[in-house]
Image (cartoon, rainbow, N blue to C red):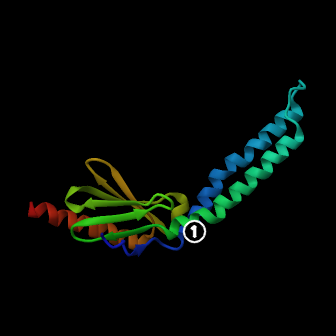
Amino acid sequence: MRTSPEHKLSKSAIKAWRLSTAIACLFFILVPLFFWIYNTFSPNEMGFSTWVIVSISVVLLIVSGLIIFFLPEIRWQHWYYQVDEHEVDLQSGIFIITRTLIPVKRVQHVDTRQGPILRSYGLADVTISTAATTHRIPALDEETADIVRDRISKFARLAKEDV
C-alpha cells in the first residue's frame, strides 16, 4: 500500500473555512427569525407557537456553533497532498477517506483561484483540470499555491514531451 501524501494545507485554512461556514450557517440561523416575524405579524391565528420557534433557534445555534468551530479543524487535519513528476496525490475525508491520484500526463491546465475570504487570509486554491474532471487543492498559502501550480505545469509539459 502507498504511503500517505506528506504535505498539509495552510493552518490559516481553518480561519478561512470558519468564516465561510459561519456565513453559510447564517442562513439557517435566520430561518427561525423569519418564522418569528411571520408569527408576530400574521393576520390569522395559524402561526407557530413561540416555544417551537425558540426551540428550533436553540438547536440551530448549537449545531451551527459545532459546525463552525469544530468541522474546519477536523477537515484541515485530514487533508494531504503531494506532487511529484508522475502524479498528483490528494487525500481527504473524515469518515470516508478519498485518495485521488492524478497522472501528470493527463493534466490539461492548472489554475490558482482566490475568493474574497481566501484573499483576506493570503490563501489560494489550486485547481487541476484533466479531460474528465477538475480537482482542487484548497487553501494553500499564496506563495505555496504558485509553486505547486508551476510545478504541476512543468511536470505536465515534461510528460507530454516524453510521449
For the residue pair 92 and 128, the one nearer the viewer reads as 92
Q: Residue furthest front?
A: 1
- Where residue 96 sits: x, y (%)? 46, 57
- Where residue 107 sits: x, y (%)? 25, 57
Give the structural element (helix, strand or loop) at label 1: helix
Q: Amino acid at mark 1?
A: Glu
Q: Quadrant of the N terminus?
A: bottom left
Badge 1 local density, few (<14 within 10 Å), some, or many (20+)?
Answer: some
- Where residue 81 sits: x, y (%)? 37, 68
Q: Quadrant of the C terminus?
A: bottom left
The residue that label 1 is drawn on is 73
Does residue 30 show up?
yes
Image position of 77 with respect to 107: above or below: below
Image position of 147 with respect to 102: above or below: below
Does residue 112 show up?
no
Q: Residue furthest top?
A: 44
Image position of 13 with respect to 110: above or below: below
For image coordinates 27% across by 70% down, the residue present is 151
Q: How many marks?
A: 1
- Where residue 138 sits: x, y (%)? 45, 62
For the residue pair 46 and 153, the one nearer the viewer reads as 46
For image coordinates 59% across by 57% down, the residue present is 20
- The picture quadrant where one finds residue 49 is top right
- The picture quadrant where one finds residue 45 is top right
For image coordinates 64% across by 58% down, the residue present is 67
For image coordinates 86% across by 30% down, the residue present is 47
Q: Residue furthest left?
A: 163
Position of 68 compared to 42: left or right?
A: left
